[in-house]
Amino acid sequence: MRFRQRLLKSIFPQRWAEEMEADSRSWILRCQDCGLERSVWEVGDVRWKVVGSPSRYRHCPQCGHATWHTLYRQPSESPAE
């Protein structure tokens, strides 16, 4: 866990911290060159209570290039009725 994540988890109440982590894990960064997908939480960032699908210019560990990564939210899995 990165410093920013530890700091935010220590500041917020536990319920909020858990919600922040779960929300960040549902956001996915996808490399536009090689297609590598990682959660925002996995790369050490936090994305909580936000909307939109921006792009980020980042280094990709799989293809080794600095490329644009698309941010999108994973569809939530609702329980089967």
Image (cartoon, helix red, strand yellow):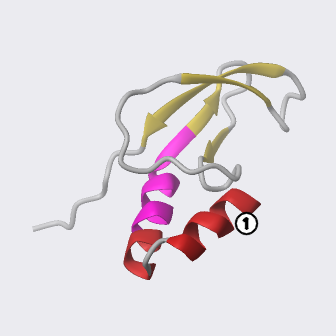
Task: Determine whether the residue tagged by mark 1 lies in a helix, strand or loop.
Answer: loop
Q: Number of callouts in the render?
A: 1
* Residue at image point 56% right, 51% down: 46
Residue 60 locus on image (x, y percent): 80, 32
- Say which of 37 and 9 sits in front: 9
Outermost residue toward the bottom?
14
Q: Is residue 42 left or right of residue 71?
A: right
Q: Is residue 53 left or right of residue 45?
A: left
Residue 66 locus on image (x, y percent): 83, 21
The answer to which image quadrant residue 81 occupies is bottom left
Q: Is residue 7 left or right of residue 59?
A: left
- Which quarter shows the N terminus? bottom right
| Residue 20 included in the magenta stretch of the image | yes
Residue 75 shows in this picture: yes
* Residue at image point 31% right, 53% down: 76
- Magenta residues span 19-28
| Residue 68 included in the magenta stretch of the image | no
> Which residue type does callout 1 highlight?
Met
Residue 2 locus on image (x, y percent): 75, 60
- Give the prevailing secondary structure in the magenta stretch: helix
- Say which of 10 and 62 sits in front: 10
Relative vertical location of residue 77 with respect to residue 17 in this rendering, above or below: above
Relative vertical location of residue 12 with respect to residue 71 in this rendering, above or below: below
* Residue at image point 61% right, 32% down: 30
The residue singled out by tag 1 in the image is: 1
* Residue at image point 59% right, 47% down: 40
Outermost residue toward the left?
81
Residue 49 locus on image (x, y percent): 36, 48
Relative vertical location of residue 19 with respect to residue 49 in this rendering, above or below: below
Q: Is residue 67 left or right of residue 13?
A: right
Residue 2 shows in this picture: no
